[in-house]
Amino acid sequence: MGWHGYLALWCAAFGTMALLGYGMSLAGLTRAQRTVRVMGRIERVREPRHGSSQHDGIPVVVSFHDPSTGQEFTVTNDGEHGDRISTAWTGREIGVRYPRGRPHAYRFTLDLWANRHGRAWPNSAVFLLYAGLVALATTDWGWPWALLGFGVPWTVSGACYVPQNARAASRRIDALTSRPPVQGRVVAVLTDTSTDSDGYTSTSHTPVIAFTTHEGTSVTAYCADGLPDPTNSYGRDVTIHYTPDDPAVFTLDLASEHRSRTSEIAFSLLALVIGVAAVVVGAVGLGL
């Protein structure tokens, strides 16, 4: 079987997967559609133990109701229970999902409605099918078709993403500066050690901060960046800028947020330029 045969088989396989996936989604038969999704509420928060692992998440107690029975469940995030909870406060809503009729198999999720229709796999299959079609066009008609096949969707997505990203970054900065900062404290530094395949051992340190917002909400959160010398930060006082609507969005370094905003916009514009250039070169190569 030559390249054409393999590419045709590739397209047929992923095209079939896409059709089956979308068909199951329309019929409501995907695993994601059979999953119960409810909002839970954090009832209690405990500070992580200094020196423990960041993989455990902030210890919390969460309550939720099973909509089919009305029964209330009170659970913890001890062990493997889905997404790690890295920011917590009493009263915060957190997503909970579980198989229908099995609330004890709960999993926490930070995005409750992600892939709620079960279309992640068929969407991936469509992408791979498209890649196969572009490869077929390239082998039959030449490399300019590859540039067009890559550049057109890249440019369209970039043209949509750039203004959205700029607006989101601007809203984030505005929200972080809409209230005076508050004082917080590093209440723990979490330590994790890992060894790679070559036997090299590395250690990471994650500070945990606690602060109270102007609205009276007591927040405990991992602080992944913005804190100098995190290894020796235990007990340090810090200044925190946060968003009033969602204290999970905060920063210790407002200047870094501004730099990050500029870098993200510049990177998005560069990606858009690359897509436009690919389309132009492909069109010129085809004599369009």
Image (cartoon, grey):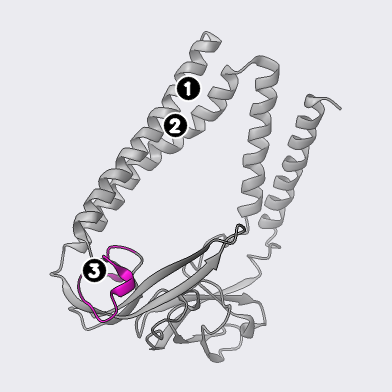
Mark positioned earlier in the residue sequence (3 or 2):
2
Discs 3/2, front = 3
Residue kind at label 1, given as amino acid type = Val
Residue kind at label 2, given as amino acid type = Thr
Residue at screen point 50% across, 28% down = 152
Between 170 and 195, the residue placed more toward the observer is 195
**x and y percentages locating residue 13 in the rendered image:** 77, 41
Between 4 and 183, the residue placed more toward the observer is 183
- Element type at marker 3? strand
- Image quadrant where residue 188 sits: bottom left
Residue at screen point 66% across, 49% down = 122
Rendered view: 153 above or below 96: above
Say the numbered circle drawn on residue 279.
1
Residue kind at label 3, given as amino acid type = Tyr
Residue situated furthest right in the rendering: 1
- Element type at marker 1? helix
Query: From mark 3 to mark 2, how far is it between C-alphas?
Result: 34 Å
Residue under label 3: 242
Mark 1–mark 3 CB contact (< 8 Å): no
Residue under label 2: 155
**x and y percentages locating residue 148 in the rendered image:** 54, 23
Mark 2–mark 1 CB contact (< 8 Å): yes
**x and y percentages locating residue 146 in the rendered image:** 59, 24
Query: From mark 2 to mark 1, how far is it between C-alphas?
Result: 8 Å
67 sits to left or right of 185: right
Estimate how packed mark 3 is, as few (under 14), some (14 to 19) or many (20 or more) residues with alpha carbons within 10 Å.
many
Mark positioned earlier in the residue sequence (1 or 3):
3
* Span of residues in magenta: 225-247
